Amino acid sequence: MKITVTGSLGNISRILSEKIVASGHEVSIITSNSERVKEIEQLHAIPLVGKLDDLDFINHAFKEADVVYTMVPPSYATTEQIKKVGETYAKAIEKNKVPFVVNLSGIGAHLPKGPGPSSANYYIENLFNSLGQGNVIHLRPGMFYSNFYGMIDLIKYQNIIGNNFDENIVLPLSHPSDIASVAFDAIHYRNFNEKPYKYVVSDEITGKEIAQKLGKAIGKNDLKWVEFPDEEMLQALLQQGMTEQMATTYIIDMGIALRDGSLLETYFKEKTELSGKIKFDEFAKEFSFVYTTNNIHPAH
């Protein structure tokens, strides 16, 4: 099969592409960074360099594809930017009559006016479903384990970890490898369910438990989860180099929706069993390695 993968060599797309290539399929990987070309070629994949909101480019990238894997990188930080990329994908899918589509969505995509990227994910899911392709599945992961790597300095120098919600909220979390595995199964085995979406969650855990498990793994047994005020959290993210749009969209607004319960209400009603296999205890070991060596693998 011919498969086109968006997301360059990011957390999920790299792992997914490696799995697809190893299974004997022809893989084209879209990237906006020409410096990634050699690395993509080393994976025995075909690099396609261009912008995700360029319809002519995406039409070319999706041409003759049997399957496309679509995602919108967090660099597209506003709802309108995310929707625009989704619309570009939809037009190219329809024009090229792509028979199978695996789309990376999010756990709050049931909310038409949801926080952060949720409302845009809702819009894109419904847009793809309206194309009449039939073979479309939207993957709805929880928050990524790998996000905790961004808290290493906070842990090292202040002995705390946290976010703008309290330590007792149960968080559905996902390992990028688990998301890639579910995406691969859909692509390779044509594993499309009757329901157009699938939650991909590796573990459910509170902030308090996260602090305990990561603290134990790195030898800081007194590590505590702290709930930061929204404005304080925003300023810290800006100091780390995040844009205000990205910080607000992907972190602050999502934290507010976790506090009021709206983000996860449907997930907890609908979930059956966790489709991910990598539990947080296993991730804590990965985190410990990164924490002590400052060596984050590209897959993260």
Image: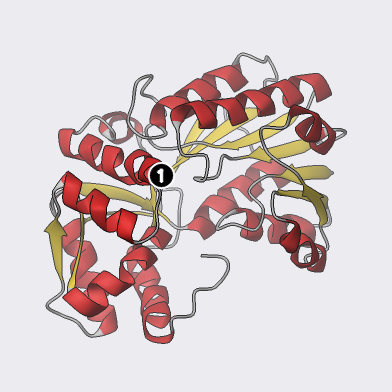
Residue shown at the point (63%, 60%) measured from the top left: 15
Total number of numbered labels? 1
Relative side of 158 to 74, left or right: left
Which residue is more in the foreground, 3 or 293? 293
Relative side of 152 to 43, left or right: left
Residue 247 in the image, given as x and y percentages of width and height: 35, 46
Relative side of 145 to 99, left or right: left
Residue shown at the point (50%, 36%) measured from the top left: 105
Residue shown at the point (53%, 18%) measured from the top left: 126
The answer to which image quadrant residue 263 occupies is top left
Q: Which residue is mark 1?
A: 246
Please tell me whether residue 169 is drawn above or below residue 54 in the rendered image: below
Residue 259 in the image, given as x and y percentages of width and height: 17, 39
Residue 12 in the image, given as x and y percentages of width and height: 57, 54
Query: Looking at numbered disc 1 in the image, what kind of residue is underneath it?
Result: Met
Q: Quadrant of the N terminus?
A: top right
Residue 201 in the image, given as x and y percentages of width and height: 40, 48
Please tell me whether residue 171 is drawn above or below residue 59 in the rendered image: below
The answer to which image quadrant residue 20 occupies is bottom right
